[in-house]
Image (cartoon, coloured by chain):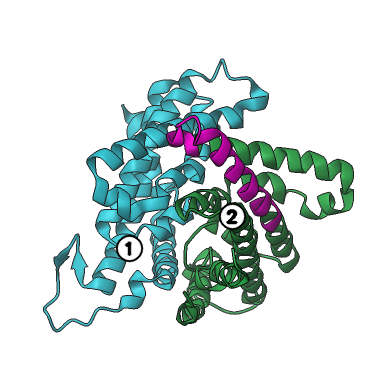
Chain colours: A cyan, B green
Amino acid sequence: MNKYLKQLKEGILTNNPVLVQLIGMCPTLATSTSLENGLGMGLAATAVLICSNVMVSLLRKIIPQKIRIASYVVIISGFVTAIEMLMKAYLPDLADSLGLFIPLIVVNCIILARAEAFASKNGPVASAVDGLAMGLGFTFALAILASVREILGNGTIYGIPVFGSSFQPASIMIMPSGAFLALGFIIAAFQKILKKGDN
Amino acid sequence: MTLTEIFALSLGAILIENYIFVKFLGICSFLGVSKKMDTAFGMGMAVIFVMTVASAVTYVVNRFILVPLNIGYMQTVAFILVIASLVQFVEMLLMKMMPALYQALGIFLPLITTNCAILGAALLNITNELNFIGSVIYGLSAGIGFTLAIVLFASVRQRLILSDCPKAFEGFPIALVTAALLAMSFMGFQGLKIW
């Protein structure tokens, strides 16, 4: 049990895929315009990550070494297609606003990286926990970035206004350049906090 | 397609809807290989090349295999396989035919498979219902837009190493802030919309 808790802590904090490993940037920047979008993207990627990690781990002794990357990509894209169809059926609004970035979960480096670095070497249970941990870490980073951008750029959080009507939203924050800016500051703050924790 | 349409399409893909600064596609390789000018340029060239060929091939795959068989939902799976094998094929071809170019592109070719800009362009061609010529032009222009962005960014980043900045911002965060400023300047192109 302790082992799994450690995995979770690593995925969410000390080895966070976005804030520490600095991978999976495209969906992070693109879908963080509002908290709702950010959470939707994070959870969709988490679902794919858990499924693909378990599947890769189960098949790790069968897949030949030479074509492993291609096999992983096929496994991942199968799950992504399933998630995409489910989202279009049950969450059409969210699917619309995430748009192109749902099929692009296939090329999210986090998922392939976990398949290669973890699931291909570990059992299915540990791989599922790893998928959950990394997925939650990704969702956590997206949620922070999306909250900052939504509060500053739109004056709301999850669609609920937080400031009075006199608040002038800085709409630059929900535009592309605001995403780079906010993420830069968040990563800087995260690095500062983690460094302090070490001492 | 008329010449005006082609012009509008490519101008749109290069400046107005720049893949990096507006659409957020291909950020991983944009941030990963922009530390030096020449590697950035090499990556840009490789992306232009693969993106153009991939746009053409995925158009054909979609039009003549996926649509007639009515398996449009297999799009993502089919496209990623096409792109992965295409990259492999291009790599082997270049190694035999043009070793100089192969040397120059080097490690960037295999990296491109996981570049979301390529798959993004292929999927956008279908969503925007472009015809064959349109798809190829769009792929080419999106690649040029990517190269423009990465070369601009690398030239700033090269100088960034020498400058002083707060300790917490060193490395990656300051690069993101720089990208934010570049993205802001690209917002100016929004006014160019001509259709």
- Give the chain of mark 2: B
- Give the chain of mark 1: A
Q: Is residue B70 magenta?
A: yes
Disc 1 to disc 2: CB gap under 8 Å:
no
Which residue is label 1 attached to? A33
**Label annotation for residue A166:** none
Measured as percent of width and height from the top left, residue A129 is found at 36, 31
At x 72% / y 68%, what residue is drawn? B37
Measured as percent of width and height from the top left, residue A133 is found at 36, 39
The answer to whether residue A150 is visible is yes
* Disc 1/disc 2 C-alpha distance (Å): 29 Å
Helix, strand or loop for disc 2 = helix
Which residue is label 2 attached to? B135
SS majority, magenta: helix
Say left or right for B87 vs B13.
right
* Picture layout, residue A169 above or below residue A191: below
Please name the amino acid that badge 2 sits on.
Ser
Q: Residues within 10 Å of mark 2 (few under 14, many from 20)?
A: many
Please name the amino acid that badge 1 sits on.
Thr
Residue extent of the magenta highlight: B48-75
* Picture layout, residue A152 above or below residue A30: below
Say left or right for B90 vs A151.
right
Measured as percent of width and height from the top left, residue B3 is found at 62, 70
At x 20% / y 63%, what residue is drawn? A157
Residue extending furthest toward the front: B2
Q: Is residue A16 magenta?
A: no
